[in-house]
Amino acid sequence: MPCPLAKQGLRPNLSIMTDITRLARDEQRNEQRVRDSFWHKARKTLGRVPFSEDAVAAYYCATDSATPLGIRAMLFGALAYFVLPIDIIPDMIAGLGYTDDAAVILAAVKAAQMHITPEHRRLARAWLVKERAVS
């Protein structure tokens, strides 16, 4: 039976809806992991990783409701990789431990650069200044 709203000869693509549903589910799961662990990990690595400002700006962008779902999902995925203890290169290896985390964070930040606003960057810098003053 033909679909009344679809163009003649075309069938609705239901796999797109499945992909969006899966993307939203993954984004929610990663968001919870990141919200539970991000600030602790950011404080722990402060001054030890060169991508701190990018990671914090990515966090602010990912938690901004104005950020599109796909960008949020990508950023939460990258941030989840950063906060989870299991990595390709374990974080405890001196000199190399955070190289994989840096690659993932920087690739996500580059891909999301048009969504990471000056306000996200300002908030990240303010957080870093405050945390450096405390430690």
Image: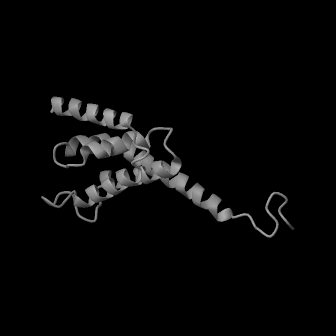
Residue 43 visible here: yes
Q: How is the image coloured?
A: one colour
Q: Residue at x 43, y 51 (%)?
A: 30
Identify the image quadrant of the C terminus.
Answer: top left
- Report whether 68 appears left or right of 9: left
**Front position in the image: 114 or 75:** 114
Q: Residue at x 46, y 48 (%)?
A: 72
The furthest residue to the bottom: 9
Mark count: 0
Q: Is residue 35 above or below residue 104?
A: above
The furthest residue to the left: 94
Residue 88, image x and y in percent? 28, 65
Rendered image quadrant of residue 118: top left
Identify the image quadrant of the N terminus.
Answer: bottom right
Q: Is residue 121 above or below residue 101?
A: above
**Front position in the image: 88 or 47:** 47
Q: Residue at x 32, y 33 (%)?
A: 122
Residue 3, image x and y in percent? 83, 62
Q: Residue at x 31, y 51 (%)?
A: 83
Residue 66, image x and y in percent? 50, 38
Residue 32, image x and y in percent? 43, 45
Residue 36 visible here: no
- Report whether 12 appears left or right of 60: right
